Amino acid sequence: MNRRERGISISFKSILAAKLGDVAQLYKVRLGSLVVFSSVIGYLLLAPAFDFFTLLMLSIGGFLVTGASNAFNQIFEKDLDSLMDRTKNRPIPAGRMTAVEGSLWAGIAALLGLVILTIFFNLATGLLSAISLIIYAFIYTPLKRVHPIAVFVGAIPGALPPMIGAVAATGFVGDIAICLFALQFIWQFPHFWAIAWYSYDDYKKADIMLLPSKGGKNKNSALNILIYTATLIPITIVLYLLGYYQLIGLVVLLIAAVVFLIPAIQLYRDISDTNARKVMFASFMYLPVALIGLLLDSIL
């Protein structure tokens, strides 16, 4: 290979790497990984036996549907994303990808993901995944600029992944699936609101309203965060008393909920961005710890 050919090869690889990076950013790979993780845990809780290929198909299908949801979100919000520091470098607002190309990537991912989840699992799994995509991309996304109730709407697709995993294992929405949905649904509120608080000034540039109080970062918003975070504790106890999990699950979920609650209390006391950031990170910690605790409870 001569120097010119090597140069062309290097240039092609650089372009390909940049394009793959943009697609990964469009799909929000890190967020998608958390979604896939919760779906896999839901599946493992009820699967009759461990099967690597089945888990791989669930992961691929779930990741593609989640990626499609995130891609559609960025297509619809391209003008808003260009106004905010945290999103202006995404491929579409930055001009590295057109909305038409983004739509192609979104459509391909949605189609492949739904087909995989329906064929390799069951119709209920495919339908729930489609409902999740539709609510997130076509209802929650435009509602964000209209009313804070968008957080409630967004919490529905946000809580569906572990239920989808459970349904993939059983073919129907059973008690465990509902339990998983309930825990993740309540978790969504302090999680969303902590992010909205920490990114309040940036969201304000795009006129996005997510905090529960019209006053924004105030005592009322902090109180809502505190109440919903604290609600995880009685829900955890009630679900234990109903027999959804045993002592190990109860202990792990309670510890995770208390650790989550501490910065929420601190935020209510001093109304600071620092403690809002702590709530945000505690919310990221709570979900994987709680799901792993439930899995350990089912195994041991």
Image (tube, rainbow, N blue to C red):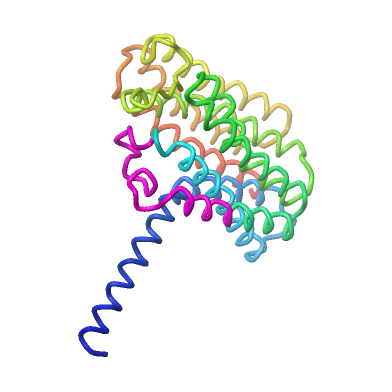
In the rendering, at what x and y percent does residue 150 appear? 54, 24
> Which is more toward the observer, 235 or 144?
144
Q: Nearer the viewer, residue 196 or 18?
A: 18
Q: Report whether 262 appears left or right of 165.
A: left
User: Is residue 43 one of those drawn in magenta?
Assistant: no
Magenta range: 81-109
Q: Look at the image and say whether residue 96 sits in the magenta stretch.
A: yes
Figure quadrant of the N terminus? bottom left
Look at the picture and state if 9 lies above or below 93.
Answer: below
* Total marks placed: 0
Residue 179 relative to residue 210: left or right:
right
Frontmost residue, 212 versus 87: 87
Looking at the image, which residue sits at the far left?
Answer: 3
Q: Identify the residue at horizontal 41%, vertical 15% (top origin).
A: 222
Look at 65% across and 50% down and name the residue there: 299
Q: Left or right: 225 with respect to 277?
A: right
Judge whether 191 appears above or below 224 on screen. Answer: below
**Residue 261 in picture, x, y percent from top left:** 45, 23
Q: Residue at x 44, y 19 (%)?
A: 211
Q: Position of residue 226 (x, y in %)?
A: 46, 17
> 209 and 4: which one is in front?
4
Q: Position of residue 145 (x, y in %)?
A: 47, 24
User: For the point 39% across and 55% down, which residue is it?
Assistant: 22
